Image (cartoon, rainbow, N blue to C red):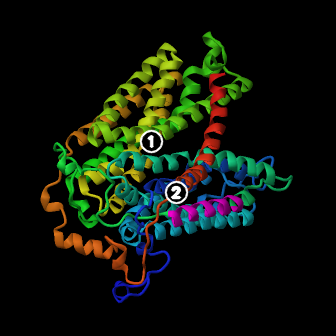
Amino acid sequence: MTGAPDRLSGAEPGFLDKERIIAAPGFNRWLVPPAALAIHLCIGMAYGFSVFWLPLSKALGIKEAIKCGPDVGFFQELFASGCDWKISTLGWMYTLFFVLLGSSAAIWGGWLERAGPRKAGVVSAVCWCGGMLISALGVHLHQFWLMLLGSGVIGGIGLGLGYISPVSTLIKWFPDRRGMATGMAIMGFGGGAMIGSPLAAELMKQFATPTDVGVAQTFVVMALVYFVFMMGGALSYRVPASGWKPEGWTPPKAQASNTMITQNHVHVKKVWGIPQFWLIWMVLCMNVSAGIGVIGMASPMLQEVFGGSLIGLSGEAAKFGNLDKTQLTAIAGVAAGFAALISLFNIGGRFFWASLSDKLGRKMTYVVFFVLGGLMYASIPGSAMAGNKLLFVGAICIILSMYGGGFATVPAYLADLFGTQMVGAIHGRLLTAWATAGVLGPIVVNYMRDYQLGLGIPREQVYNQTMYILVGMLVIGLICNLLVRPLDPKHFMTAAELAEEKRLAHDRAVASELGNVTMTHHQSSIALVLLAWAAVGIPLAWGVYRTGLSVTKFFN
């Protein structure tokens, strides 16, 4: 990226620079959400990487895993080439994804605001897809450290940059519908696995041979496909000219007084010292911790609570501990359909709740999450004891919709409180709450389950205490949310500080300020908008269709 002095002297900005993507008059803002979805649907495959674990655990043995010796610990396994990896070892890649997502978003969020979404999107594509290619090499050479470096570290950085790249841009394009706009993009992250997992399964079937499980080739093909989509999304980003607003829209400042929506702006370097930031950090952390806890246990919980009743058995014979291998396989198939069902609610909730927050307000939406969510969690032990599958499944589906909704609503919450100038960078720092929740939620759930089993409590009752602990987390989140108040004016940038930040971020009100760069009126055609949406809508519809086929196993 060339320096600011060159810009002022009339030198033309580089192809990836923010100045090159200021939208011309007549640009249709509805072209931006498909660009964001193109990136989020690809990086969302991070949720679906577990589809590779079983084949990779037999990469050498093919039919049966070649187990490592008892003297081979985790660090030796990183470099071992003569035995297969354990699934628990492969799971470290999943952990790295979300640790690196949160940390890279926090570290480079400020750079992203100044560099613009196009450059950040291109870097994300190179990291995510390049990481998959390095992982393919790791599979080929049977070196797990290459997989951790590739998809885990480099890919994790791509995740973080790709995840937050559209946030600030969408909020600026849709000041009238902030929740809906960010909900569309973040819905894509939740939906990425719906497309990627069945695609990976089909590719592995095609590439599998008697001597190869087909994972390396699948990584290569998916990396190339994802690169095309992600680059298409990155190059399609446009940012509005400084001061742009939708025709006929009145900013909230002139409306009844919604004091929770500011027209001022906070610098990202100040947020660590602002109480409201930490309150929202806790709000997100508690909502996500409770939700992750349910996601991780939903399938085994359904099987252990309802046992053979899922396949028509009754009485003592239906208890989980009395089932034979064939019956256990049958109920596992039903549980897989249940997992697919809750994934649909997770994704749909991201768009539904975020859009609803534009009407209810962000603070009230989170009140609904915590109050309604608390009631749902508290109802699960009762519905389990009564054997009421409908209430049990309904409660978990609603919980998962609000889990997804929490992710999608929080960027708009931040924009309301902290302003839009650096909301992407502030959102990046807030994602450290996600990384924390990713550790906290599973630890609480798994520890409590093991503790309850150790006390000799029947399997169908081991989750009861856990549900009440998760209710407690939501109460903490509710209290933090109720304490959120508008910011003290001292936290906002002064007019001079804002002008300097706009200069560093290369914000421009008109194209003529760019020297050699000129823009003419550009009326986006409806056909182009429809084509852009079809490019992301068709793969997403295919993913929903494939997931729907899995859901039928549950209802049948």
Left or right: residue 146 compared with residue 472: right
Establish if 264 lies above or below 381.
Answer: below
Magenta region, residue range: 220-236
Looking at this view, is 330 or 390 the one in front?
390
Q: Is disc 1 placed on a helix, strand or loop?
A: helix
Which secondary structure, mark 2?
Answer: loop
Q: Which residue is mark 1?
A: 351
Mark 1 Cα shell of 10 Å, populated few (<14), some (14-19), many (≥20): many
Instruction: Name the image quarter holding the N terminus.
Output: bottom left
Front-lying residue, 369 or 94: 369
Q: Residue at x 46, y 53 (%)?
A: 30
User: Is residue 514 located in the magenta-colored stretch of the structure?
Assistant: no
- Decide which of tag 1 and tag 2 comes sooner along the chain: 1
Residue 12 drawn at (x, y percent): 44, 84
> Residue 529, percent across and down?
53, 54
Q: Residue at x 58, y 66 (%)?
A: 149
Residue 525: mark in rendering: 2
